[in-house]
Image (cartoon, coloured by chain):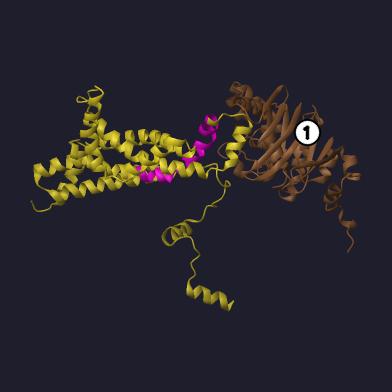
């Protein structure tokens, strides 16, 4: 191991960023697929479909209860064997597909629980109003219930995206050249461990921050129908800064209180 | 127009409707009154199968649906012939006033957007909310929300409108604006069944009043008659609680 030098951090960051697109592709594709599967998995439990309901429960507990690294191996090595039995050959399928599938199935388990809770939280009256104007069950779900449920579950979905982002660092164990994989090669080439991992940590952290901010904006947009227009009157800058630092509870300064008593 | 034949409804062991038969002619405004827990709201909700009756038959226009073998498509057709105004308004929270009224027209009736929009704007103007087209329900008062609810119900051009205690959730000072809107549409000859606690309003606007108690219809008749000279003891007892304030003796 070489002596740590700061300049390597700056040297490594652009090199690692050259693999960022793979990381983001895994996150984006697996979230999109996971959201679709998650909603589908939530349905049987929401509508209490006899047998499917149990299967959906089993699905959720299996994918939540198994480490993602093991899932990666199971799906990458196991799925082709299973498919061979029905004469489907997937040996030429890129590794990335298996990785995305694994993360999608894994997030779907969490998403389905979030969606289920959010759907059940939507007021029953919303569905009744939809039925009363003659919507079918499907129309009521897609047009009225789901949009409200998804808007409410944005914070949970944001968590899942960030968890996924960090979990993509395991994909290199199947040889996928995403950022962590790239870091490994930099380490192997230069033996500057610490710099490589510091750069890597910094990148993951910054991307998480950006994602958090984006989701905050998305949440505000999606929930713009909630609450009166001027629910939060704009405060002077000093007050906003104080609240950001100390929270919104009214902070009493002892000497000011004393003065108030005198008056 | 609307007919209920021996409609019964039980929740578990408790029978809430004990064989209700009721006929409402086209253009009638029927007010259903009675103490809470008497089954008025359940009766109303059985008409559009938001509650599935345990037995009996519901007829709206030329469509007869029997409780036992109600097909999904029949229920849908029944709901498309009626519309409902809810006690809690139940406006679609994520849609603006205009979108709330348009929703059924574009999704259920499959009208072209422009036409749906035009009709919805007209209806919202009619209920006095032409200036609030793009407001979300959460930013409107209860009275405004309920008037949108009424516009949404009217938009579907139903054969009858079912109103479930349309003013019960409102602040007293907002009741008037909603009643005014209902009064106006009553004049247009739209068939309505209103479950209400507003006795004076029922007396004024209804062409017939139905008094329910403990899951049965105790008595019905023109408002002038039923309020002034109730035949049944139970009706008299119920109405006495709504007597004008001055008439209490202490």
Which colour denotes chain B?
brown
Q: Is residue A154 magenta?
A: yes
Question: At 73% across and 49% down in the image, what residue appears?
Answer: B36
Give the x, y percent position of residue A59: 35, 39
Pointer 1 chain: B
The residue that mark 1 highlights is B22
Which residues lie in the magenta part?
A138-160
Q: Quadrant of the N terminus of chain B?
A: top right
Q: Quadrant of the C terminus of chain B?
A: bottom right
Taking depth in this image into account, of B106 and B32 the one nearest to the observer is B32
Q: Is residue A155 visible?
A: yes
Q: Is residue B129 visible?
A: no
Q: Main secondary structure of the magenta part?
A: helix
Q: Residue furthest front?
A: B13
Q: Is residue A174 left or right of residue B239?
A: left
Q: Is residue B74 left or right of residue A101?
A: right
Q: Is residue A149 magenta?
A: yes
Give the x, y percent position of residue B109: 62, 23
Taking depth in this image into account, of B117 and B23 the one nearest to the observer is B23
Question: At 84% across and 36% down in the image, what residue appears?
Answer: B208
Q: Is residue B83 left or right of residue A21?
A: right
Q: Is residue B8 left or right of residue A39?
A: right
Give the x, y percent position of residue A83: 25, 27
Q: Which chain is yellow?
A: A
Taking depth in this image into account, of B250 and A199 the one nearest to the observer is B250
Give the x, y percent position of residue B43: 71, 38
């Amino acid at each position: 191991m070489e002596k740590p030098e700061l300049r390597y951090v700056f040297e490594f960051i652009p090199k690692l960023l050259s693999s960022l697109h793979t990381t983001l592709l895994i996150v984006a594709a697996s979230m999109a697929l996971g959201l679709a599967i998650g909603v589908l998995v939530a349905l049987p439990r929401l509508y209490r479909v006899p047998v499917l309901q149990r299967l959906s429960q089993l699905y959720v507990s299996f994918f939540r209860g198994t480490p993602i690294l093991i899932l990666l191996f199971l799906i990458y090595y196991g799925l082709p064997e299973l498919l061979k039995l029905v004469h489907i050959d997937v040996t030429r399928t890129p590794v990335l597909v298996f990785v995305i599938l694994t993360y999608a199935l894994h997030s779907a388990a969490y998403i389905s629980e979030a969606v289920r809770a959010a759907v059940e939280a939507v007021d029953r009256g919303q569905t009744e109003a939809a039925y009363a104007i003659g919507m079918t069950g499907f129309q009521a779900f897609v047009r009225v219930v789901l949009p409200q449920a998804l808007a409410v579950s944005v914070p949970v979905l944001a968590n899942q995206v960030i968890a996924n982002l960090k979990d993509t660092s395991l994909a290199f164990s199947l040889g996928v050249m995403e950022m962590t994989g790239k870091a490994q090669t930099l380490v192997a080439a230069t033996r500057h461990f610490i710099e490589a991992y510091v750069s890597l940590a910094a990148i993951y952290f910054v991307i998480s921050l950006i994602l958090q901010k984006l989701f905050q904006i998305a949440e505000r947009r999606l929930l713009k129908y909630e609450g009166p227009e001027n629910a939060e009157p704009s405060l002077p800058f000093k007050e906003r800064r104080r609240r950001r630092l100390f929270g919104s509870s009214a902070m009493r300064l002892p000497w000011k209180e004393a003065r108030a008593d005198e008056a | 127009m609307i007919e209920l034949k021996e409609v019964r409804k039980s929740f578990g062991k408790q029978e809430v409707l004990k064989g209700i038969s009721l006929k409402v002619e086209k253009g009638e405004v029927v007010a259903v009154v009675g103490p809470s827990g008497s089954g008025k709201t359940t009766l109303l909700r059985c008409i559009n199968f938001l509650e599935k009756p345990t037995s009996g038959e519901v007829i709206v226009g030329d469509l007869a649906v029997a409780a036992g073998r109600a097909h999904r498509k029949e229920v849908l057709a029944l709901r498309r012939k009626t519309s409902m105004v809810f006690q809690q308004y139940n406006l679609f929270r994520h849609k603006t006033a205009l979108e709330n009224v348009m929703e059924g027209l574009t999704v259920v009736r499959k009208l072209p957007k422009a036409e749906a929009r035009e009709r919805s704007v007209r209806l919202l103007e009619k209920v006095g909310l032409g200036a609030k087209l793009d407001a979300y329900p959460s930013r409107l008062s209860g009275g405004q929300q309920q008037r949108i609810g009424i516009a949404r119900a009217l938009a579907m051009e139903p054969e009858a409108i079912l109103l479930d205690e349309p003013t019960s959730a409102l602040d007293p000072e907002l009741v008037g604006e909603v009643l005014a809107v209902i009064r106006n549409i009553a004049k247009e000859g739209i068939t309505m069944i209103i479950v209400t606690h507003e006795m004076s309003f029922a007396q004024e606007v209804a062409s017939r009043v139905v008094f329910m108690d403990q899951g049965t219809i105790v008595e019905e008749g023109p408002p002038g008659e039923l309020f002034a000279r109730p035949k049944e003891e139970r009706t008299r007892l119920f109405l006495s609680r709504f007597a004008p304030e001055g008439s209490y003796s202490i």
